[in-house]
Amino acid sequence: MKEIIRSPLFALLISILAYETGIFINKRTRIAFFNPLMIAIALVIGTLLALHIPLEDYKKGGDFISLFLTPATVILAVPLYKNINSLKKDYVAILGGVIIGSVTAILSVWAMAKAFGLSKELIASLIPKSITTPLGIELSTQMKGIPSVTVAAIIITGIFGAVFAEWLLKVCKITDKTAKGIAIGTSSHALGTTKAVDIGETEGAMSGLAIGLAGLVTVIVATVLFKFGFF
């Protein structure tokens, strides 16, 4: 039994089942706080503790999922292609919003990290918090950050966006559908986009478009700042 529990396939199985359970609970309750990924994380951690499965053994199965993260980044071209007409029509507003949002995300992390006295390694790890995981891991690695910290920051940012995005939009009195989608996609990548899709079709499409653009802008800006020794 121990051999089965510690096998990579078992780790892969509990990851899939945990996420499917999260999706089921989220759909049945319709409560934003019950984010599928957050539920899946809690269930996986609980399973590992209950069955005394070492993290190293679980990671062997988790690596199967991680293997597909980088190739999956290519899919970001799909929403860009599908919404190319919208991008051409409102390119100034869309690009302006994404650029300002991405730069603000980078500078806010840098400023707060400096204020709290964090090391350069941690700053480099937190900079990619608002972009999709494959890009964030690669960017963090290039800037000599800690990929595991980057993944945690990305997940927390995404869950925060999925849970609070709609409420924040109401508080800020943002009513334009395109603006809503761009704001969510730029600040909280794919996890936030799941909420944008629930809000509306246009919001979801624009959020999907923003993911790719925000990732591109963040990589370029962060790389330039890193080269000049800002962090």
Image: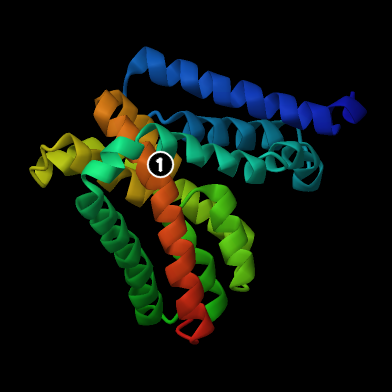
- Please name the colour scheme applied to the rendered image: rainbow
Q: Nearer the viewer, residue 6 or 174?
A: 174
Coordinates of residue 221 in the picture (x, y in percent) = 43, 70
| Quadrant position of the N terminus in the picture | top right
Give the answer, above or below, for where 147 lies relative to 190: below
Coordinates of residue 83 in the picture (x, y in percent) = 35, 35
Q: What element does badge 1 sit on?
A: helix
The kind of residue on which mark 1 rests is Ile
Q: Quadrant of residue 34?
A: top left
Q: Residue at x 33, y 32 (%)?
A: 205
Q: Residue at x 41, y 61 (%)?
A: 217
Res 119 seen here: no
The image shows a total of numbered marks equal to 1
Viewed as shown, does residue 147 lie left or right of 58?
left
Coordinates of residue 182 in the picture (x, y in percent) = 28, 45
Q: Nearer the viewer, residue 96 or 130?
A: 96
Viewed as shown, does residue 11 lie left or right of 200?
right
For the view shown, which residue lies furthest in the left direction? Answer: 173
Viewed as shown, does residue 150 lie left or right of 5?
left
Q: Quadrant of residue 18?
A: top right
Give the answer, above or below, for where 143 lies relative to 149: below
Q: Quadrant of residue 47?
A: top right
Give the residue at mark 1: 159
Q: Residue at x 57, y 43 (%)?
A: 73
Label 1 environment density (alpha carbons within 10 Å; few <14, some 14–19, many ≥20)? many
For the view shown, which residue lies furthest in the top direction? Answer: 28
Res 228 seen here: yes
Coordinates of residue 124 in the picture (x, y in percent) = 52, 71
Q: Residue at x 61, y 39 (%)?
A: 72
